[in-house]
Image (cartoon, rainbow, N blue to C red):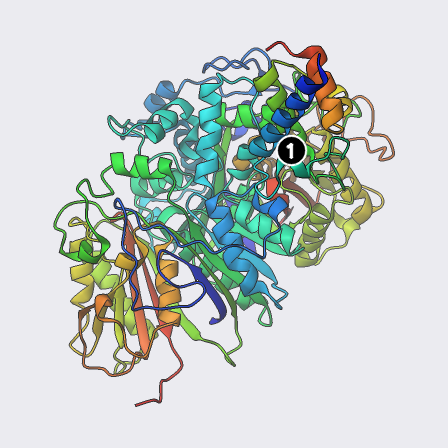
Amino acid sequence: MSILVTGIGIISAIGNNVNENRTSLINKASGITTLSLFNSRYAGLRPCGEIKIETTALKNRLNAFEKGVTRSSLLALHAFDEAVADAKLSLSQLQHPRTALIGASTVGGMCLTDELYHDANKTEDGSEYLSSYDCASVNLYLQERYKTGGIVNTINTACSSSANAIIYGARLLKQGYADIAIVGGTDSLAKFTINGFNALHILSPDPCTPFDRDRKGLNLGEAAAFLVLEKEENTKGKTVYAKIAGYGNSNDAFHPSSLSDAGDGPYLAMQQALSEAGLHPGSISYINAHGTATENNDAVESEAMLRLFGEVPDFASTKGYTGHTLGAAGAVEAVYSVLSLFYQEVYPNLNFQQPIENKELIPVPEYKKKSLRHVMSNSFGFGGNCSSLIFSTV
Amino acid sequence: MFIHHNKCISPQQTFEKTDWEVLHESVENKLKAIEPSYEGIPPGVLRRMGKAVRMGVGCALPVLQGVQADGIIIGTANGGMEDCIKFLNQIIDYEEGMLTPGNFVQSTPNVIAAQLGLMTRNKRYNITHVHRGLAFENAMLDASMMLHENPQAVYLLGAVDEISAYNYNIDHLNGWYKKEPVKSRNLYSSITEGSLAGEGAVMFTVSNQETNAVAKVKGFDTLHTTNEHTVKEALAAFLKKHLHADEKPGIFFTGENGDNRMLKYYSAAESVFDEATTIARFKHMSGEFETASAMALWLACNLPDRLPAHCIKKEGAANSAGNIIIYNNYKGVQHAFICVQKPVNNKE
Amino acid sequence: MEITEKEQLKQQLKQQIIQFLNLTNVKPEDIKDDQPLFGEGLGLDSIDSIELIVLLSREYGITIQDPKEGRKVLVDINTMVDYIIQHRTK
């Protein structure tokens, strides 16, 4: 049974919808800027992929005035609405018991770092966000808003979260637990994550340079992306972007916050995705790499790609456009991979100059048209949680 | 799906020497877990672990002894909440100055599954479900799908959540815990809003192998609704799907939690059963937390021959447990049913 | 600085390290002055090294920006104490 992508939606630092995102990717227009929408000591010091729409403006735009709605939820709603409209799903389809909603988030309502500090440490005078801090709050909000009828789940495997949400949704369809799965992820910028990654000394003071020898770390970003998945037999007459051909999930089992030199986790995840898809390494025509631009990730991912592919296919990281959007990254890059396939084009890697010593891998430098059959998308997270997806043309 | 090895760290005597008759009481409206000494965790690793991670890992290691699990599947609403807020407090207290990253690394909910992968050198499937009151049920669905995909496999399936000073504050401010002091033994006679806080870790190995299994999970279902009639209809449909027409469940095990706003759901659910079925409750043992239903499942797997009186709400006519139906709801929105079958008890 | 003062500082630093890194099973006297902090010695890792740099900042007002500098300082108790004596601002 084939699982097809029939709708996509995205909001990120390079665009408020799918078309804007694609245009930015084609034009090498990065969304990495100075933080301007919230106060942080690092606003001027650590560039981020910030969506330049204030939270109140998002509420107005989405007509979302429920109590306690956070920026993470609003971004999710934005992308969810676009994906659902794109797939032409009706409200009654959303409310059907066989329509699943599988989302991912790592920040959830913790984007409200100061409010959370207050509510967690005081014993009276709680804010309106008391039910909004956890990761599940996002999907519970979407469920409540549309009264979605089927299985609802939230996954958190750090930076591979939404890749796993996509996998979970595809498996629900394959095993008959749902007919439609709306899958994706969201994360907004937060003092919490900026300070966390900064404390680990892996935030770059400059726009990030994935796979470059002199990379200085990652830029954080915020985004949400959703995909509508349907079984092939239910998609007659619909626009179909791609099919989910394979997926893999593996743990690197090496260190809480860094990957092993040999990259066993990334290697096994990619290998498993290939085997699930019944493909040989040579059949992959493009890889949307995780490529966070940290010292550790890019060296390890390069090593794992070299181990698996020998001759590494065209690859690029899109983190130079959006920043690392954490729990949303897997879904954001799944949308980009699907767009690559649909339009038969490859998006370039920004800010690359010199290859990493001993790896000598050069990511795609310029936008190009290319005949593509199978695209791989990688997502690796803290805790060694590695996932890889393969999308194919239908 | 069959349950084999299983362990539970809870506010009751469940981990080392299980004893259902000794009832540990709540203190200041909290039922805190009785933590073991964690001898299996090297001190160098233990020092970094917050309570949730410690309980999860400490509970899982004995379950995994001698088992090469094909995957680690954990449900937890918050993971290490304590570490999360410690880091948050540093951010504010030190005005985003130099911060220690240890709490940040430990604060992500996937740390329990990740740490287990690391400690048992398990590079296979590894995932964390965090869907609040249905985090465990979604983990269970994942395990069940994995067993369908890999029929010979064995998975670690578990759930963990902790009481931290912080999530207690937040839920207390939000009215989910009782404002007046209530002892856990009097939980069900309380007529006010809110429940008692609880915590714990539960770990199972699950497979398709019936031999030596302690219980079979015949089915489970989840739903999101605030309507008690919808819950009742869904439960009736659930029973019809998993039981034969003449099969009466021995025990209906509910998550009734002393919160007067939740009673309508439990009453509606109880009305589905007749006098054959014993109605029993567990939240006076576990307290209320997002993955408490995992503890209910563990209790169902380890039922003594006679259910202790403190669990029984209404004694039924059926003299053997047979099928046990668990119903839990979290905050009146997230509902779950589990149908468990114990091996037939031939003692009578 | 008097030898005794230096010894006192060593004792204080050991206690701070134990507390900061939550080394619950280690007593100050278990840490030898020339015992490597990382790897085979005390068994600390990369996250601990960042935590120790924060310790130096909070307790002694010492700012270490360059990780290479950090590696030179965080060798053992002796190297840390010598560095603290030279660079402390509080």
Residue B233, position in %: x, y? 22, 63
Q: Pick the residue in front: A174 or A257.
A: A257
Chain for mark 1?
C
In the rendered image, which quarter is residue C10 located in? Answer: top right
Total of numbered circles in the picture?
1
Q: Is residue A385 above or below residue A222?
A: below
Q: Where residue B142 sits in the image (x, y, percent)?
A: 49, 58
Query: For mark 1, what is the residue?
Result: C47
| Residue B42 x, y percent position in the rendering | 62, 51
| Image quarter hosting the C terminus of chain B | bottom left
Residue A169 visible in the picture:
no
Seen from the viewer's position, the closer of residues C15 and A210 is: C15
Answer left or right for A383 relative to B5: right
Give the amino acid type for the residue marked by disc 1 in the picture: Ile
Assess disc 1: are there few (<14), some (14-19) or many (≥20) residues with their C-alpha within 10 Å of its C-alpha. Answer: some
User: In the image, what residue occupies the spot 44% across and 63% down?
Assistant: B15
Q: Nearer the viewer, residue A219 or B276?
A: B276
